[in-house]
Image (spheres, rainbow, N blue to C red):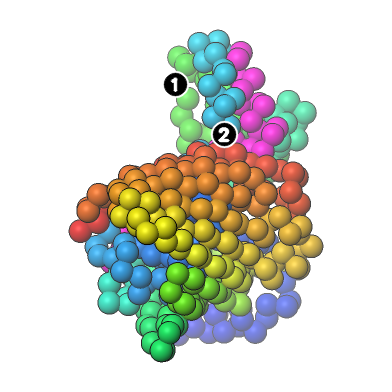
Amino acid sequence: MKKTGISVILLILSLSCFAAEYKEAPFLPLSPFILGQGGAFTADPGGYYSLFYNPAGYVNEEGQGLILPAASFWMYTNPGDSLCTNWSDAQAAVDFYDAQMKKGGYGYGGSIGAAFIDGGFGLGATLMVDSLFHGDRLAPAMDGYLNATFGLTAGYAFTLDFENSSLSLGFNLRPLYRINAILSSSDAEQIMNDFIDTVYDPSLNYDFFSSINSVPAVHGISVGFDAGAILDLGSLKIGLSIRDIGRTVFLYKASTIGNILSGLSSFQADTGSPVAGDLYYIPMNVSIGASWNIDFGVKKIFDPTVVLDIQDIVEAAVDNMSFWTLLHAGVNCRFFEGTFNVQAGINQGYLTFGMGAKASFAEFNAALFTRELGRNFGDIPNTGLAFDLILRF
């Protein structure tokens, strides 16, 4: 324990001495409810996904209780192209995959977790996996990633009441363990070629792990901190979220995916050699948002809320990203006291749509979305579908 503490201190003191810096993806399972309304969730968070967006949402009575499980699945693919593909024709199927990778990328992801949110406390455990393949397989010029992250979240929020308003403040502590493989062109091509060959000939009995076991990867731990605030003015709420305060730095070791998984199966999480000279981190994300609940006098039947976020302000300025990549806006319409909901929004300049159903103990949501993977609107539009199922006790 003492040795680990010394290592962490030395890491913090020497951040400026690293030869190269690599920005990691945030620990943020995709929520179809949030994506459906354009990705905005800063000012009116609640329930399971407040663990990842704004800890001040722990005081929101909606979504509180024991959540077990919260399961989500997403795929990066254009459903319109999929419906127009003749899947009985092997060449047509291969052409579909190649077209998706060239456009904005093709891949899958999912998460499963459990949480307890009540009395201002937020406690959760989540496993998330994600993958994406992008580029021209035949050029060849491809890239992509494969990663898996397990995270624990512990947070607390409280409310300060004023005469005509209230201010909620929340904080998170989040230990993470991540396996991350940034795929070289040759690795990405090999994995997809094996997959494509099996589309041509299913008798090949394609084994996904046989293609990725030799892929170089890093794995290790980090600890992140979040803070958030929500000013409640009645029908209008204003939110602030600061995720991964200061940036969340990983202590990584380098190995291969096969060796890492083999080590984990034997309860040996220290497989590989320490990564020296490079810095891997999740950038700090500062976001502001607003939500406006519009009362037409029939809230039990029709209850709309307009939401607006400006997200990732600091990184957008550092990377000189366009304003569209920061913008998230939408509307969520609840019907019959929230039994059904429909969303529409603009996510980084692209239209999104979502819908869901909710009972006292369960909710299901689905969304069609597009996100921007480049710096500017139109650079790398990545379209996908997302679904989730949440059970609450």
Q: Secondary structure at mark 1?
A: loop
Residue 132 placement (x, y as % from top left): 59, 42
Magenta-colored span? 91-116
Instruction: Tell me the CA gap for discs 1 and 2.
Output: 24 Å
- Residue 107 sits inside the magenta stretch: yes
Residue under pointer 1:
205
In the displayed structure image, the side of residue 348 where residue 110 appears, left or right:
left
Tag in front: 1 or 2 = 2
Where's the N terminus, which quadrant? bottom left
Q: Image height check: is 306 above or below 235?
A: above
Q: Is residue 184 magenta?
A: no
How far across and how far down the image is residue 46, in percent?
Answer: 38, 65
| Residue 245 appears left or right of 99 | left
Decide: marks 1, 2 in contact (CB < 8 A)? Answer: no
The amino acid type found where label 2 is placed reads Thr
User: Disc 2 designates what residue?
Assistant: 77
Please name whichever residue, 201 or 350, is drawn nearer the observer in this view of the structure. 350
